[in-house]
Amino acid sequence: MSGPEGLDPVEKAVREAQVATVTSGPGRAVGLLRAALAGAPGDPRLLLALTDALAADGSLEEAQATAREAVAVLPESEEPLVALARVQLKMPGGGIRRAAETARVALRLAPDSTRAHLIVAMAAGYDASATRADRERARPSAEEALRLAPDLPLAHVVAGVLDRLDDPANAETHLRRALALYPHAPEALTLLAGLSTTEEGAAAGLLRSAAALSPLDDLRRLRLEATVLRVAHRAAVVAPMVSTVALLGAVWLPVGVGIVGMLAPLVFLVWGALRTLRKVLAEVPRSMVRRVLWSDRGARLQTVTDVVAPLAAAAGILALGTGDGEGLPGVALVLLASVASAVGGTVLNERVATAEGAIVGVDEDAPARLGAAEVGAVAVRAGLVVVVGVLWAAGLVTNPFVASAVCLSLAAPLAGAVLIAVRHGGGSAWLRLLSAGTVMLALLLGLGGPVAELVSGDAAERPGGFTWVGVPGGPEERDALRRERQRQEERERLEEQQGPGRLPDFGSEPPRAPTAVPTVEVPDFTFDWPTTREGEAPVGP
């Protein structure tokens, strides 16, 4: 039966709900569809429209139940299964994997369903737990969707999602094709910005465009802010790494020029980081940059530490290469650079993890995965600390100040990584406990020997400060080497003072005039020997 406008009442209710979703929100559409269902209970068109409205309103459980009701009404049709799979894509707790299974069931009913093929490929591309084999299994569905709808922008976006990890160049091709077909696709812009083939300056511009196209999407705004924060922190990351390498090199490099040469890679890396930051800032409004870098207490702390770290690293390398004595200022500056970098990195990760955990409500595992990535980095950093401890035990790092500073420089980011993992549930409980235990064991092994020697006072009794040459053996051998090296340096200093072709003057006093040598009378010790009558002295007894 047709209504006054010649439309079926059910079709009219569906259209009114679609208009209400745009003008008044999905909640209004849900009310209209429920009222229509009261007059036509079990109508599959109303059930499918109500499913979409409930999903848009955030009522995912009700949407799933409504979709299952539609599947029961139309068991031989793929359309209710596709609607159910779309809802499951948004549900946490493994919903994305259930969506792929539901879409595969729909493909058995309709092998040429473009939407079902897209859901299978999309689930494999967005599932963080999916392996490369899972993505390869879903690739035929992406190819089939492109064959069925070659000019559909969503088909190219899904192909880009599937290839973004395994083949970023091909993913970029598909995403650019999607933007050519529909330039105002924020999802394509966001995905293109996240590819490894996209420079960070260009990525910031893409994210800014995506945020402008969807101003109510906090996640895209957050990603843009995170890009600014990470690029601003990059110089503070590379500088302590170079200065720590210089500190380790000071153990084996006796020439100060060799250590000062470490300034070249430091300047190169920091300059590259600053150029990238300049490109990013050119794409982001100044007001947003000021808000991101100086808006609250955490932002100000990160900004200050990001400025301090490179400056302290450069000053530490200069102090190591040009300073004399025991070189403790250089060690202290290198340690300051590492601590500043670690503090800035901890603040950055905490801000990003907290914001994403609050916004990404459809994927409850996202903060856990972020924390798990930080936990995985703990083992690598802790292993480096253990290596320094082994070098100390073998006698290859002979100065306790150097060994302690290197261990602390390497271990500085560990506390932040463990903090992020614990606060945001990174991985399972046993993994977090194992990470914390690894950190403690690494510090114990790495710092145990040097700190024990510092506490015992042996290091203070050693002359000469830094030991630039490592030597195996105990304290006696190292002390003997220091004394021999000091004697050698003293001989070299004297030779430099004398200059070439000069004889030593054996002192600094001016020559004195010769004095007269006194004469001494030597007494005559001659005396008469007794003689015989013939006048000869007797010989023998």
Image (cartoon, rainbow, N blue to C red):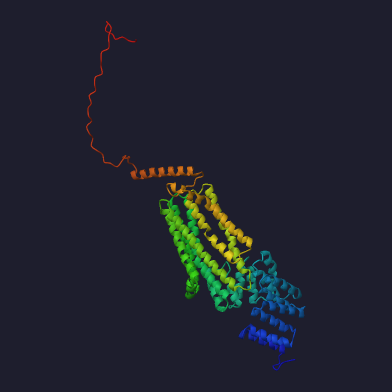
Please identify the residue farthest to the front as the structure is shown. Answer: 456
Rendering quarter of residue 426: bottom right
Q: Is residue 234 left or right of residue 28?
A: left
User: In percent of the image, x 51 and y 62: which residue is there?
Assistant: 342
Q: Please provide percent x and percent y for residue 244.
A: 49, 56
Viewport quadrant of the N terminus: bottom right
Rendering quarter of residue 62: bottom right
Q: Please provide percent x and percent y for residue 70.
A: 74, 80
Q: Is residue 467 visible?
A: no
Q: Is residue 367 left or right of residue 450?
A: right
Vertical arrangement, residue 327 with respect to residue 541, above or below? below
Please identify the residue farthest to the bottom as the structure is shown. Answer: 4
User: In percent of the image, x 61 and y 58: which residue is there?
Assistant: 434
Q: Is residue 314 visible?
A: yes
Q: Nearer the viewer, residue 261 or 315?
A: 315
Vertical arrangement, residue 130 with respect to residue 482, above or below? below
Q: Is residue 298 left or right of residue 527?
A: right
Q: Nearer the viewer, residue 259 or 48?
A: 48
Q: Is residue 469 left or right of residue 20?
A: left
Q: Please provide percent x and percent y for residue 472.
A: 51, 44
Please identify the residue farthest to the top as the structure is shown. Answer: 533
Q: Please state the total of marks drawn on the protein image.
A: 0
Q: Please provide percent x and percent y for residue 110.
A: 75, 76
Please identify the residue farthest to the right as the structure is shown. Answer: 76
